């Protein structure tokens, strides 16, 4: 069965492929395999709406079951910002480094005990006919005072995980793919993916 990942974020693709590697007989494609696909504007007002928007559009266009990930960082001190705007926090087409620099600047002089944050991920699985399922995962942490580590992507160098005493970027993929918001969302979605896989094999 072919499964399309409706994302252009290479960091997400690597992690999703790794997390679902135990599901047999899935041929994973991404939107890079469909260059004629028009860009999708993320106009939803929350993670769930954006995830469904991306998965539904790509499933309809490609004719394959599609998985989309809408995710971001929510910082309590900033009333949940950057949230759904995490990818473009420092502006349209901002780099990860620019987003991290802006977050550090905004939180300048905020003490460690007030730097609670969470990574949130909503996964949407949609059929070409428009049938959709969603699951949400979270990962709690703190925003560090300076970036550390070189693994992962996005805000990983600033996301300090108290249970390990390290940032997500120091922890590396093996640990991240066990504790991340993405892993938590996919864990809930896996039984459904398995069901879809089975139905597609038997033609139900
Ligand atoms: P697609 O929409 O094509 O999937 P995107 O990067 O624009 O790619 P989002 O709109 O979901 O995706 O924004 C997610 C942003 O949230 C991402 O660019 C990072 O800045 C941040 N983010 C999400 N998951 C993360 C993770 O595991 N580690 C670090 N930062 C993460």
Image: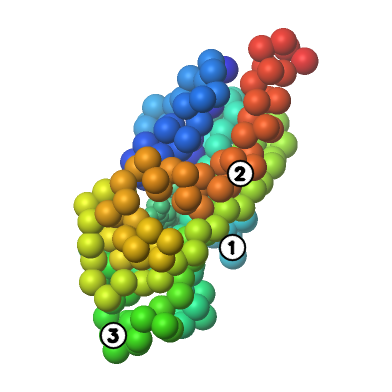
Real-space CA distance between mark 2 and mark 3, rounded to the nearest whole angstrom: 35 Å
Residue marked by disc 3: 108
Is residue 28 visible in this depiction of the protein? yes
- In depth, the one of 179 and 95 nearer the eye is 179
Number of dots carrying numbers: 3
Judge whether 63 appears above or below 16 on screen. above
Tell which circle, 1 or 2, labels the residue nearer the N-terminal end: 1
Percent of width and height locating residue 142: 40, 71
Determine which of the numbered discs, if any, sits on residue 96 in the image: none
Judge whether 175 appears above or below 155 on screen.
Answer: above
Residue marked by disc 1:
46
Q: Mark 1 and mark 3 in contact (Cβ < 8 Å)?
A: no
Query: Disc 3 to disc 1, how far (Cα)?
Result: 27 Å
Q: Is residue 130 left or right of 121 when viewed as pictured? A: right
Query: Tag 1, which secondary structure?
Result: loop
| Residue 102 visible in the snapshot | no
Q: Residue furthest bottom?
A: 109
Q: Is 21 displayed left or right of 67 in the figure?
A: left
Tell me the quarter of the image containing the N terminus: top right
Within 10 angstroms of label 3, few (less than 14), some, or many (20 or more) residues? few
Q: Nearer the viewer, mark 2 or mark 3?
A: 3
């Amino acid at each position: 069965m072919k499964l399309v990942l409706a994302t252009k974020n290479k960091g997400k693709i690597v992690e999703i492929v790794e997390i679902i590697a135990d599901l047999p007989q899935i041929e994973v494609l991404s939107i890079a395999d469909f260059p004629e696909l028009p860009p999708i504007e993320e106009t939803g007002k929350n993670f769930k709406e954006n995830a469904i928007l991306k998965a539904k559009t790509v499933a309809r266009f490609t004719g394959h079951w599609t998985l989309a990930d809408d995710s971001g960082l929510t910082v309590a001190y900033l009333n949940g910002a950057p949230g759904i705007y995490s990818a473009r926090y420092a502006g349209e087409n901002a780099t990860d480094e620019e987003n991290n620099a802006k977050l550090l600047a905004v939180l300048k002089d905020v003490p460690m005990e007030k730097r609670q944050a969470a990574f949130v991920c909503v996964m949407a699985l949609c059929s070409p006919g428009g049938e959709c399922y969603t699951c949400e995962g979270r990962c709690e942490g703190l925003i560090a005072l300076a970036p550390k580590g070189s693994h992962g992507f996005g805000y990983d160098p600033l996301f300090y995980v108290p249970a390990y005493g390290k940032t997500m970027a120091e922890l590396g993929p093996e640990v991240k793919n066990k504790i991340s918001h993405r892993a938590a969302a996919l864990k809930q979605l896996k039984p459904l993916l398995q069901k879809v896989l089975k139905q597609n094999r038997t033609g139900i």
